[in-house]
Image (cartoon, rainbow, N blue to C red):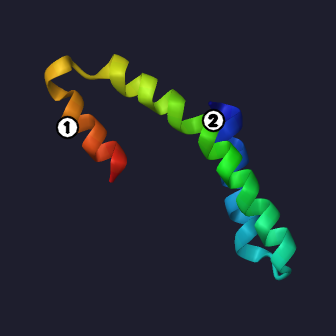
Amino acid sequence: MSIGLLLFCLSSFLSGFLHHWYFFLVCQSFQAVADSMIVPAQVVLIRKSFPQDKMGWAFVLFSI
């Protein structure tokens, strides 16, 4: 999860400063790959951290 978070932050930072369209798309692609590493780990953390009766509330906040 930490590699995904690092990749996401780095690609977000770089995409904000790039002036060339193709490099921007590459950074956005890395962001998508990093997001696909982060989200499943967050779902597991939510399931382990919250009791069953608060699970819906936790996933609503996660979705927002």
Q: Residue at x 61, y 40 (%)?
A: 36
Disc 1 residue crowd, few under 14, some 14–19, many 20+, Cα 10 Å? few
The reply, left or right, for residue 29 in relation to residue 43 is right
Q: Residue at x 67, y 44 (%)?
A: 34
Q: Secondary structure at mark 2?
A: helix
Furthest toward the bottom, the residue is 19
User: Label 2 vs label 1: CA separation?
Assistant: 23 Å
Q: Residue at x 85, y 69 (%)?
A: 23
Tell me residue 30's x, y (percent): 75, 52
- Residue 13 position by quadrant: bottom right
Residue 57: numbered disc: 1
What amino acid type should be assigned to the residue bearing mark 1?
Trp
Tell me residue 16's x, y (percent): 70, 73
Image quarter in which the N terminus is found: top right
Residue beneath label 2, please? 37
Which badge, 2 or 1, is on the more N-terminal residue? 2
